Amino acid sequence: MATTIDRPALESNDASESRDDKTRPFSHFYRVIWRWHFYAGLLVIPVVVILSITGIIRLFKPQIEQAMYGNLMQVVQSGPALSYSQQLESAEAAYPDATPTGFRPSDAADRAAEVGLKTADGRDLTAYVDPYTGLVKGDRIDSETVPAIAEKIHGTLLIGTVGDYIVELVACWALVLVLTGLYLWFPRKRSAVWGALLPRLRARGRTLWRDVHALTGFYGSLLVLFMILTGLPWTGFWGNRFSQVWNQYPSGFFDAPKSTVLTGSLNQDGSKIIPWAAEQLPIPLSSTEAGHEGHGGSTASSATAPTARQAVPLDLDSVIGIAEANGIHSGYNIRLPQDPKGVYTFSLFGGDLKNEVVMHIDQYSGDVLANVGWEQFGTIPKVVENGISIHTGERFGVPNQLLMLATTLGILVLTVTAPVMWWTRRPAGRLGAPAMPKNFPLWKGAVAIMIILGVMFPLLGASLLAVLLIDFLVIRRIPVLQRTFV
């Protein structure tokens, strides 16, 4: 990713390069693009490798978890299932010092129910409960699973918000790499088809590495662009602001008191259960006031759902019955209320996008305070949801996983071939970056492109400005740095 197809003139000595500059009108512009491509690649390759490896682990999360926890997840049907409340009580009895935080009903006859628990020391556990016997088969620490660690590295590099911003910045610079790489790749002569569209089968050494880099970059460019653009909505700076713009629901959309906490906060490290399109939805509050009834179109009757006047929380079976009566499909997760004002939050994320939903239910009355699904998502959120589901390999099953795996492996090929090409042409004692031309007639076009990208992606714009300032105010004023970098 740090370099790409080199024209013959660019591989020759400075004199031949100078002669070529006189005969090709776009040579100066080419050199500037090549220089940006070179430095961008050197800066982002280490993080791109990390993101690629952790992305592959995240991509195969279902298979990894099945391999590691299959003995806990699988059960043998041995009669009628216990009630959901009994299954939850079994986990509470096994972990008396922990607080139940979530529940995932069994969605197959041979699948254990999952109970989320927070221990006294603040750890989040998932306990696996046999729905037929109530036996707690075992547990796992959510933050210590391989997919969870990989996802946390993938999102924050394990350094919190700063890491999140670094990941976003690298993604933006990877976008620059793809665009500049395509410009450098574009064959300007018919004779350049070999090495640009087809590999030179007899090539060896640096030429072979260059062809592998160029062909991988060209044929994989659309998928790499897709992966970058579909990953950006999850980022903390650009992605959060993009979400705030497109995922706002009109005032009064829900007839229920709302907290200042957003539904997206229910996503945990390594476990995203809330659709991106619903992350900005405020979590409503359960009402304990006398006379509260009938908000949100609940299908529960007064016989099965006590009113808030009684201030008695519904049992888990009643709440699940309400959610299923309102159309939620199997495979959902439940976040349990954690205080008297809390709500039951049902969420279904991944798989068939048309089944995605977030449903908040009053813990006392059973009123459905919010029910947001595919039909309520706007056009842009639907596009983003489709992109994210393909990015994570959840849209089309195994073929989807294999497509994204091939894309990620292609990125790794680019990160390997780029430094090899650089190392084989690097002059002794110098970095070997493409020289900046003295006369650059197309500077206005380059500035316009940089401004557009900088406005679209503010972190990229800020870093571009920083690089330019360092180049002109520091590197060009210190002879040692000038000899190395210019």
Image: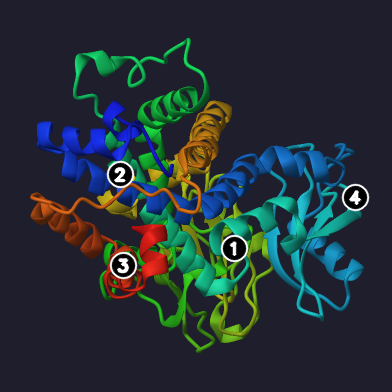
Query: Dot 1 surroundings within 10 Å: few (below 14), some, or many (20 or more)?
Result: many
Which numbered disc, 3 or 1, marks the residue that appears first in the sequence? 1
Labels 2 and 3 touching (C-beta < 8 A)? no
Q: Which mark's residue is nearer the viewer, 1 or 4? A: 1
Task: Please indicate whether residue 16 sits to the left or right of residue 231 in the image.
Answer: left
Residue plotted at (51% across, 36% down): 424
Q: Which amino acid does label 3 sit on?
A: Asp
Which numbered disc, 2 or 1, marks the residue that appears first in the sequence? 2
Q: Mark 3 points at which residue?
A: 471
Q: Is mark 1 on a helix, strand or loop?
A: loop
Task: Please indicate whether residue 124 sits to the left or right of residue 135 in the image.
Answer: left
Residue plotted at (50% across, 89% down): 289
Q: What element carries label 3?
A: helix
Q: What residue type is labelled 4?
A: Thr
C-alpha separation, residue under disc 4 versus residue under disc 3 = 69 Å
Q: Where is residue 157 in the image (x, y as percent from the top left)?
A: 59, 63
Q: Mark 1 points at which residue?
A: 157
Against 175, residue 76 (above or below) is above
Tell me the number on the disc at residue 34.
Answer: 2
